[in-house]
Image (tube, rainbow, N blue to C red):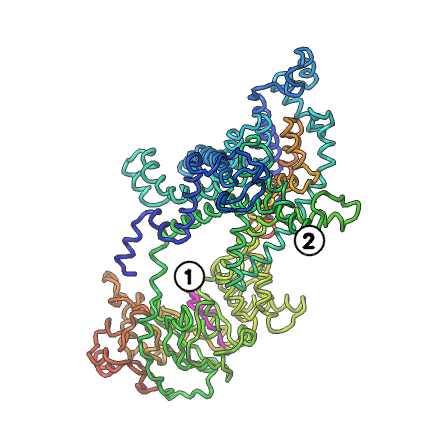
Amino acid sequence: MIRLIVTRLVLSAVLVVIASLAIFVLMSFVPGDPARTILGANATPDLVARLREQLGLDQPLPVQYGEWLAGVLHGDLGQSVLSGDPVAQLIAVRLPVTLSLLLLSTLAISVIGTVVGLGSAVRGGPLGRLLDTVSLVGLALPSYWVAIVLVALFAVAIRVFPATGYQPFVDGPVPWFLSLVLPVAALSLGGITIVAKQMRDSALDVLGRDYIRVLRASGIRERSIVFKHVLRNAALPSLTVLGITVVGALTGAVFVENVFVLPGLGSLVTQATTSHDLPVVLGVGVVFTLVVIVVNLVVDVLYGVLNPKVRVR
Amino acid sequence: MTAIGRSRALSTGILPRVLRKPLGVVSGVVLLVIVLAVIAAPLIAPADPLAQSLRDVRQGPSAAHLLGTDSLGRDVLSRLLYGGQESLAGVVEAVLAMLVIAVPLGVVAGYLGGIVDRIVLRVVDVLLSIPGTIITLAVLAIFNNSMLVAMISVGVLASGAFIRVFRSVVLGVRQELYIGAARVSGVDEPRIVLRHVLPQLRGVLLVQITLFAAATLGIQTGLAFLAFGPPPPAPTWGGMVAEAASLIQIDPWLLVPTGGIIAVTTLALCLLGDAVRDANQERFTFAGSAARRSPAAARAVERPAAPEPSGRSAAGALLAVRGLRVGFGERGAETVVVDGVDLEVEPGEVVGLVGESGSGKTVTALSLLGLLGANGRIVDGSIRFDGQELVGLSNAKLREVRGAGIAMISQEPMVSLDPSFRVGSQIAEAASAHRRLGRRSARERVDELLRAVRLDPSVARKYPHEISGGMAQRVAIAIALAGEPRLLIADEPTTALDVTVQAEILDLLRGIQQRTGMAIVLVSHDWGVIADLCSRAVVMYAGQVVESAPVRATFAEPRHPYTLALLRSNPHDAVPGEPLPTIGGVVPSPAQWPVGCRFAARCAFATDACRQAPIPMVDVGDGRMSRCIRVDALREAVA
């Protein structure tokens, strides 16, 4: 188990390097000059040259990358081309928003997805068909569209939740929670249906296994069969899907944050992309990569805990 | 469906199969209409997508504007048609980029294996862990909002998952016999890949393309929604959703057509993908499944009159089954597979239930515990256990009987234990199903039960995958014994085990039976096992009991031609050098049960009378029963 985690971590470090290198290489293909882009077409060559030097753009690419990487290791992600603020600071301010969104969504996806999936496997019939229909619709509707409709329904029409904006957790958990209900709903809908479908399929598979019949033949209570044996065995394949879904929610967060005007990393990276602020895009990229790595690591560890065959003694 | 029809269906390709599914046809047609309409936008669009008309702003649907107009009075339908060009082109770009990378890498990794495979899998790991959105956004930032480059990067970044899918398909194909045959006969490798491997990939490829296209459409429109697409006033699907969002309080209608076209296209792609997947799976699994169900013929079989109980008294029986009929399939149109079975088991008696596969012996055994599954039910008859009627009992009441009254061990010990829990926990759970046990006494009980099946108590700490098949069957027996049942149903308990282990398990069962005095119903097709353990044999054929007699007498003088044939085909008695004796023909499936004697077609003694009417069970003396009217002829032949 520990070996598994260490291998994973080493691989992850390699991954961050490769991902960031990829962006750097892409940058070398950029047709224009970032300094000129920032200063505009009317800037004097002298001014452009000075900015290039200031941004380190006059250095050869490998040197630029080396310096950037060395900075990352010290927690320095460079400076925003646009505002001059340290990227690390920009990210630090906005990270809690995205993490709150992601954590609550993960919670919603795993809990609701499991309950609905298991329920429709055991009860079957209409509930299963309803899940099929809802999951198709949930998959088909883009999350940003769902977000807009949610705003229209719950924030504008019946004013239950705030339409947009974010309330920090430190200002009180209730406003924080209320400000996230709609974004989380928009972000989770697709994931819930995917996890629920997977849960139902694997629960049905488990229910057909011989050992379930043996458990019934031993007079074990149905409650224990469903919540202990079926849940435990069906959880394994669902866990993998949950991991993929949570990574996908990271992408969804970019859209949802924009609709709900949440000051998170998603809206930051969108603004940075619009204004060609590459250090910020790169910095957010590193953070997102780290989140993906952590999610995958957690999934691997949970998988090992749930599956005795993986557990290494 | 006839056999000929089925084989023809098998040989057809994927497309005709998809076209036979309503959902496949509908989604395919919808998709085709959307794609054609978008391509032909300049020809069919009712208006110029950019033409503003300040007199017609924000109108709902009308004859002039089928989907209404936006805030600048532009025709929504026309804008959707033109806007789709960018979106659909983006989808095609991303899908092509994905295919160009994923197909060669997947095929090469799956086909070559070894070091190539490992390297490709590493690359896939990396691709899968990169947050694609950020890279795509970075690409947009670098390449000045070029949607083309962005969509290609979406395709490249997504290729990791698809490499895995294609690789595993190729891996499966490679192991098929005909590929090996082609290799051995010297066909060169690229040719094998082109001629034999790639065609197998086609179905999976189609499924993955549709699903990926659906996902890509979401990303493409999402990027346009975030204003990374062509700048206004150019129409884009995502951009139109954004426009609608800004007007949500004034004109909510605009959200419907703009989100609707994306949802409908995505839905059509997903459903088409599902249909292709189903069609693809059918191609490989079609043959086996549909054969068993043909209810009409089964119902035509008349139910034979319930025979009088034989000389044996039912009063003292532990288990008394009368006229048991079990059906599978839809209620009211069941296929009856067990048809009027009578069975009695005295306390402490060991009864063997013998017959070929398909005779209904396992279904009979399962129905005793009410464990027929969702599809099967007891249609008629009575099962009395210890004086209590089990048929019609609620699940909760049945649960009290299961384990404590009647317990079961099954054929495949390795799959009859839950792989996620330690052996000890599973035994403890069975032990505490019927009475409360503290933690300590549960552990003592587990130790005691493990010793009873001659296993070391340390086995309790093991997981099922850590023990052998023989040990697993012992554990299964321990679980069955945990509730101190009075009747044990052992369904082919040794079939899946090695010969040496078989003998040990039979010894164990005999020892336990003698010590506890519990009765056993042993389901088996192996006369050796029956002779070893049972005092009475009940022979089943085509859902009926055909003979019931003491084991010794059954062996010496069978009173039913089927019993005789079964005994003669026992491989243990085969003469070395001679071909193994077998019974000609096969057990008829429930759909093909004849009106008269069900064995007549395979019987050397059969006469016309045998085929005319259902044959009742008759008392043939010495407490023996037989479902044969040619017993006298049989008696002479055996003597």
**Residue B462 is at least partly visible in this image:** no
Residue B5 position (above or below residue B207): below
* Residue B506, magenta (yes or no): yes
Find the magenta span and give its range.
B487-508
Residue B562 painted magenta: no
The one nearer the camera, B10 or B224, is B224
Name the residue rendered at 58%, 51% in the picture: A192
Give the residue at mark 2.
A158
Q: Which mark is residue B496?
A: 1
Q: Is residue A51 left or right of residue B146?
A: right
| x and y percentages locating residue A24 in the rendered image | 60, 25
Q: Which of the two marks, 1 or 2, is nearer to us in this view?
A: 2
B195 lies above or below B422: above
Residue A187 x, y percent position in the rendering: 62, 46
Looking at the picture, which amino acid does disc 1 mark?
Ala
Q: Left or right: B461 with respect to B202?
A: right
Where residue A236 sits in the image (x, y, percent)? 56, 52
Is residue A133 or residue A123 the one in the foreground? A133
Q: Residues within 10 Å of mark 2 (few under 14, many from 20)?
A: few
On the same chain, marks 1 and 2? The answer is no
**Is B106 positioned to the left or the right of B56 in the image?**
left
Please state if A235 lies on the left or on the right of B372 as rendered: right
Decide which of A304, B32 is in the foreground and name it: B32
Tell me the subunit letter for badge 1.
Answer: B
Q: Is residue A163 above or below residue A36?
A: below
Classify B167 as above or below B619: above
- Distance CA(mark 1)–CA(mark 2): 64 Å
Give the SS element for disc 2: loop
Which element is circle 1 on?
Answer: loop
Residue type at numbered disc 2: Ile
Work out which quarter of the rendered image holds the N terminus of chain A and state it. top right
Could you tell me which chain the residue with mark 2 belongs to?
Answer: A
